[in-house]
Image (cartoon, rainbow, N blue to C red):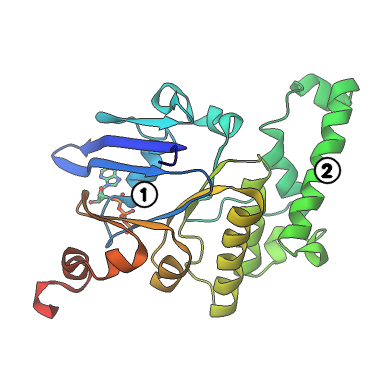
Amino acid sequence: MTASLLRVAGLTKRFGGLVAVDQASFDVAPGEIVSVIGPNGAGKTTLFNLICRLYSADAGSVDFDGKNLLAYRADQLAGIGISRTFQNLALFEHGTVVENMLVGMHSRLKSGVLAGAFYWGPCQNEEIEARKEVERIIEFLEIEEIRSQPVSMLSYGLRKRVELGRALGTQPRLLMLDEMVSGMNQEETEDIARFILDLRDEFGIAVLMIEHDMNVVMDISDKVYVLNFGVPIASGTPAEVSSNPAVIDAYLGKSAA
Ligand SMILES: Nc1ncnc2c1ncn2[C@@H]1O[C@H](COP(=O)(O)OP(=O)(O)OP(=O)(O)O)[C@@H](O)[C@H]1O
């Protein structure tokens, strides 16, 4: 049996009378790509926000690498190996590609703000290491040519790639991607799908992603977890889930079945 990196058990969130996530339970193994899918309002973003500690859970547990994740604050997650992108781009618009990536990395650098301001001793070494790491990520994501451009000048697809790069800057073991390819054209989508596979294959990074693009989900996921009205209705390989009658009903409606 593969040890799990992330284990979600019975995770529940209520907003007043609405149960937005109702006893979600699933595992992500090291180096595994797991997609969370479901129709609009199914509870996917709420599930992500629970795992990322933006919301507190009403019931259930989340363990990451054997640690009780619910005991951590959102700002501590990068330090223990979890990184996330957001549905809406969250970049520093006037900064260059390199600057945006460095901002992401500073959350995990150990030197204090004062040392950073004066570029002292250990801080100087960390800064050099951070810049080397940024260069590795830039090469991996094939964005050398735009490294000095302000993010505001870039196409949507390239901005998303920069956001992915920034998330990688914290050297995560689990990367959480929220609708990474929404709004992308086919070529941009295929590029991102390839990068996600390479992240797993080359660096062993596990990926938990919310994704509406079913081609991407079916092509690259090891496992798929399906929510509908907050309730888990299926989990399994892409082939198992796509032939599951409950999933077909949830997406197409019973009348189409
Ligand atoms: N902060 C909140 N307060 C009250 N209700 C909320 C809140 N956040 C989400 N909800 C409700 O919880 C349910 C699940 O929403 P959620 O955004 O998690 O779904 P989703 O699957 O991510 O949807 P989408 O695919 O449209 O992004 C919805 O009915 C939504 O209206």
Q: Identify the element where label 1 is drawn.
A: helix
Q: Is residue 76 above or below residue 7?
A: above
Q: Quadrant of residue 69?
A: top left
* Disc 2/disc 1 C-alpha distance (Å): 32 Å
Q: Identify the element where label 2 is drawn.
A: helix
**Mark 1 residue's CB less than 8 Å from ligand 1:** yes
Q: Nearer the viewer, residue 238 or 98?
A: 238
Q: Is residue 249 left or right of residue 166?
A: left
Q: Residues within 10 Å of mark 2 (few under 14, many from 20)?
A: some
Quarter of the N terminus within the rendering = top left
Q: Is residue 147 above or below residue 48?
A: below
Label of residue 208 in the image = none
| Residue 96 visible in the picture | no
Q: Quadrant of residue 224?
A: bottom left
In the rendering, at what x and y percent does residue 133 appear? 78, 44
Dot 2 or dot 1: first in sequence order is: 1
Q: Amino acid at mark 1?
A: Thr
Q: Residue at x 36, y 49 (%)?
A: 45
In the rendering, at what x and y percent does residue 67 appear? 46, 24
Residue indicated by mark 1: 45
Q: Residue at x 10, y 72 (%)?
A: 254
In the rendering, at what x and y percent does residue 211 appear? 41, 61
